[in-house]
């Protein structure tokens, strides 16, 4: 990066280099091994590290211990279709680790991977078949409304099922001004899930009426925001509402705060700040475009001013994952002024969380072979790089995530995934395009800088794709192959792999965890 007195040159490469930690960093250093997997199994290819998901669960549970809290970490299954990840979590402490399923097939998959029904949380939109099996196996059902509760009650009674544990999911949390009846100012954004707090009376009445069929074990919320204050307010409100429920003879004992703990994708804050600043400059036209056909990611120029809001995930975050949970539990809650962890302890409440993206952080990488490299027609110093994958195979941008892939040259050199432009290589800007016959099939709309121009046969590794990226939008359009998935583990200094569906967390004295 060329600078003069702190000024960054307009033509300097705008990297968004990924955060890579062990053991994923070690795996990316094994270019020949990864090339051999792509040669054997095709492009695209998903590679998962199931041991990392167990380590991530342990990190979340360490936050529980730090605050002297009890409860359970539920993996949000929808983040990834893998069997290996779910099986590895099933082998964790059954008291502390569960799974959150949002469909009938997810429930069947979790049970087949080793989870017992009492470790399962059923969430999301539910049809009668999903509700029946959840109640049949003893799962906890996270109900969104009084109507859904009544549907569950009919199934329990009609089929002679055991009393089913339920959580009541709430939304529309009010400010502390609303607590005293002075006025209502809703701080949490609206959601199609959950019962608004202002309408919860009907839900409490239904729970009282049908206490023979369902047992209220707690209250829940999941807010689509990164705002700590808003989440702390909702947690505090749930603690107070639990007391109201107990006064009515109900017996809730847990608060489920959902997920949304975040992941740090980009390694350097300066690179993220530099790129987002440059995007605004490009939208204004004071520097060359950074994106395909001037795409602004939600920003636009009006009268010499940037308008709109960038629809981007905060790819560099100072607090994410277990650290975000720790911060949420530690900061004073708005109304009572005490940390949420203290409130949970004082009221003898357990804590449930449902991390998805954060629980599979650093668990996976998506590999794609370079098929073609050619210059663009509008800029001779920019290139189109066509990959053996399409936008559905690595849908980072679908979730607003911007992060550079790692170049793995076919010849195995250089050892570092990013160079500094020396030794004959120089950074180059490329547009990554997919294998579909569609103008819109762009792996990323932005100009991606690589340490050197790739060649056909090289592999690009998209890092940290296990959460909502590697298979969330995968499809078979134009009969292009959907990525296979493999699980890898490190044993005696070497990497071993097997198909995802063949991984089992079995410990053999000499063979390792297969």
Image (cartoon, helix red, strand yellow):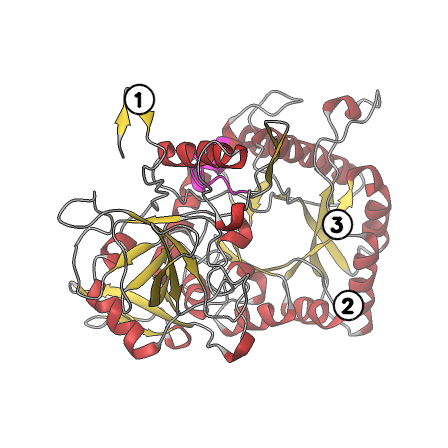
Label 1, on which residue?
6
Number of callouts in the render?
3
Circle 2: is it few (<14), some (14-19), or many (20+) Cα within 10 Å? many
Residue 322 falls within the magenta-colored stretch? yes
- In this image, 468 relative to 503: left or right? right
Q: Using the numbered discs, state the Cα–Cα distance from disc 1 to disc 2 in whole angstroms.
A: 68 Å
Point out residue 274 in the picture as x, y percentages from the top left corner: 40, 32
Q: Which residue is mark 2?
A: 156
Task: Indicate whether 350 appears above or below 23.
Answer: above
Give left or right: position of 372 versus 217: left
Q: Which percent across, then down, holds residue 218?
A: 67, 46
State whether residue 472 appears in this view: yes
State the extent of the magenta-drawn residues as a range. Answer: 312-327
Asked whether, in this view, residue 257 is left or right of residue 380, the answer is: right
Left or right: residue 154 versus residue 288 is: right
Callout in the foreground (1, 3): 1
């Amino acid at each position: 990066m060329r600078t003069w007195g702190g000024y960054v040159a307009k033509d300097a490469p705008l990297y968004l280099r990924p955060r890579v930690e062990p053991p994923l960093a070690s795996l990316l250093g094994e270019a020949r091994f990864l090339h051999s997997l792509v040669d054997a199994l095709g492009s695209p290819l998903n590679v998962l590290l199931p041991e990392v998901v167990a380590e991530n669960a342990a990190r979340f549970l360490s936050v529980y211990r730090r605050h002297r809290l009890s409860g359970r970490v539920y993996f949000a299954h929808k983040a990834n279709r893998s069997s290996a990840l779910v099986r590895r979590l099933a082998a964790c402490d059954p008291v502390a680790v569960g799974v959150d399923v949002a469909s009938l097939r997810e429930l069947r998959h979790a049970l087949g991977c080793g989870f017992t029904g009492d470790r399962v949380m059923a969430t999301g939109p539910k049809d009668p078949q999903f509700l029946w099996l959840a109640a049949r196996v003893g799962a906890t059902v996270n109900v969104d409304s009084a109507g859904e509760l009544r549907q569950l009650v009919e199934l329990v009674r009609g089929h002679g099922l055991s009393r089913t544990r339920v959580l009541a999911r709430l939304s529309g949390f009010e400010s502390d001004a609303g607590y005293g009846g002075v006025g209502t100012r809703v701080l949490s954004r609206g959601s199609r899930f959950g019962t608004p707090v202002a309408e919860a009376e009907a839900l409490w009445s239904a729970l009282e009426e049908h206490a023979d069929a369902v047992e209220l074990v707690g209250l829940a919320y999941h807010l689509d925001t990164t705002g700590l204050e808003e989440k702390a307010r909702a947690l505090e409100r749930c603690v107070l509402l639990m007391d109201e429920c107990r006064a009515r003879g109900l017996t809730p004992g847990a608060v489920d705060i959902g997920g949304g703990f975040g992941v740090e994708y980009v390694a350097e804050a300066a690179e993220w700040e530099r790129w987002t600043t440059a995007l605004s400059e490009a939208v204004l036209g004071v520097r060359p475009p950074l994106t395909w056909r001037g795409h602004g990611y939600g920003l636009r120029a009006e009268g010499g001013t940037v308008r709109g809001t960038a629809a981007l995930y905060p790819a560099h975050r100072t607090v994410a994952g277990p650290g975000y949970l720790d911060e949420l539990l530690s900061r004073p809650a708005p109304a009572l002024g005490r940390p949420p962890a203290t409130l949970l302890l004082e009221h003898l409440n357990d804590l449930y969380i449902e991390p998805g993206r954060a629980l599979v952080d650093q668990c996976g990488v998506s590999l794609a072979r370079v098929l073609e490299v050619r210059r663009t027609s509008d800029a001779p110093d920019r290139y189109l790089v066509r990959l053996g994958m399409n936008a559905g195979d690595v849908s980072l941008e679908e979730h607003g995530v911007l992060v550079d892939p790692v170049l793995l040259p076919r010849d195995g050199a250089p050892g570092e995934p990013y160079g500094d432009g020396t030794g004959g290589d120089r950074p180059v800007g490329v547009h990554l395009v997919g294998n579909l016959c569609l103008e819109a099939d762009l792996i990323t709309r932005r100009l991606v800088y690589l340490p050197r121009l790739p060649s056909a046969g090289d592999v690009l590794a998209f890092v940290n794709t296990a959460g909502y990226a590697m298979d969330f939008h995968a499809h078979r359009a134009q009969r292009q192959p959907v990525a296979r998935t493999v699980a890898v583990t490190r044993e005696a200094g070497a990497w071993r792999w097997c198909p995802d569906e063949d991984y089992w967390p079995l410990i053999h004295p000499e063979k390792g965890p297969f």
